[in-house]
Amino acid sequence: MTTKLKNPDDYGRLLEDLKARIQASRTRAALAVNSELIGLYWDMGRMIVERQQTHGWGNAVIDRVSQDLRRAFPDSKGFSRRNLYLMREFHLSYREAGEFVQQLAAQIPWWHNVLIFSRVKDPAGRTYYLRACLQHGWSRNVLLHQIETDAYSRHALAPKTTSFQETLPAPLGEQADEMLKDPYIFDFVTLEEAARETDLERALLNRLRDFLLELGGGFAFLGSQYPLEAGGKEYFLDLLFYHRLLRCLVAVELKVGEFEPEMAGKMNFYLNVLDDKVRLADENPSIGVILCTNKNTVVAEYALRRSGAPVGVSEYQVTRRLPKELQDALPSASQLERELGEMLEKRE
């Protein structure tokens, strides 16, 4: 039986508030459990390392510990030989880094940690991926993709060609710089040598999930060939995004070829129209990103120096399809397989 209420709207708000409180409590409980687990694995790795160093024990002791712990805790799956080795490596990887990195590591899942300390050897790179996982909530697959494409170097180490810090208030300018990669790797796209901007745009939109993954966390897609009206004329912006963390619109122009100074002027125009006609009152100023095949850094810096608009220029890389005459000259997969089989038969 449903009870009738005098203020059903207020009941709806109450129910939503209760749901949010329950979800928040569950999230904190899950984080607490994860933090306790990471702390346990850290201590186990430390204790194993210390005993090995004190008594001169080799790695055979890890095999024995694994057997005894699994016998003592048959319901636990975390005490395999492999996992104990990983606990040891976990401690060895971070023991010089201090409490700061340990606290970061305790906030992400164990197998995220394993990916980071086993595949990234630079301490600053490890800290970058730990922070990014926390900030963007990356899954393991997304984290693996970011590591394999060296997002750290392209985000944190690559020299940026932008006017973000000169045209945006702090810390928004620094955050916008951190958002930008250089170059972007669109290896999921294959283009002909004579491809146009529209071909690149279509290819990226056909693989929108991969495109957003390469752009990085926080991007929400708003539209392609986004119409803008000014002075009774209509203009079309290649791609428009919203960045949740920066809380601003991000205009993206795609260029097949080298960066030219007039591209910055056109982007400046788009950003002015976006700020006047699309941006909401509580949002930060819109920013622009020009993606081109290559750029002359000196030319780009001169073009942006006094533009007054927050614009960044980055290169991108795609897979180029071989010309047909070269494709015809190359052996097919079946031919290669047949020739390889013949070679193996001759060796036998």
Image (tube, rainbow, N blue to C red):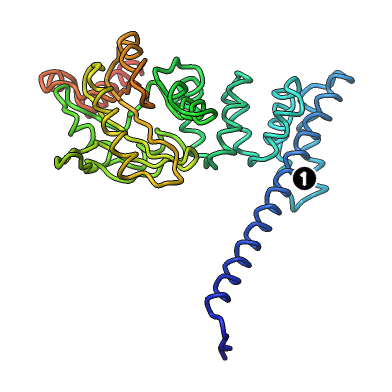
- Relative side of 49 to 198, left or right: right
Horizontal arrangement in the rendering, residue 284 relative to residue 190 (left or right): right
Q: Name the residue under label 1.
A: 70
Q: Which residue is drawn at 23% across and 35% down?
A: 201
Q: In which quarter of the image is residue 36?
A: top right
Residue at x-position 71% and y-position 54%: 29
Please identify the quarter of the rendering in which residue 205 is found.
top left
Provide the secondary structure element on which disc 1 rests.
Answer: helix
Residue 101 position in % (x across, y down): 70, 28
Position of residue 107 measured from the top left corner of the image (x, y, whole percent): 67, 40
Q: In which quarter of the image is the C terminus?
A: top left
Rendered residue at 50%/31% (across/down): 172
Left or right of 292: which side holds 183?
right
In the visual, does 279 lie left or right of 11?
left
- Image position, residue 187 (x, y; %): 33, 28
Say which quadrant the N terminus sits in: bottom right
Quick check: 238 above or below 23?
above
Give the residue displayed 37% in from the left and 15% down from the top: 305
Count neighbours of disc 1 (C-alpha within 10 A) and say few if under 14, some if 14 to 19, many if 20 or more: some
Residue 46 vs 262, above or below: the answer is below
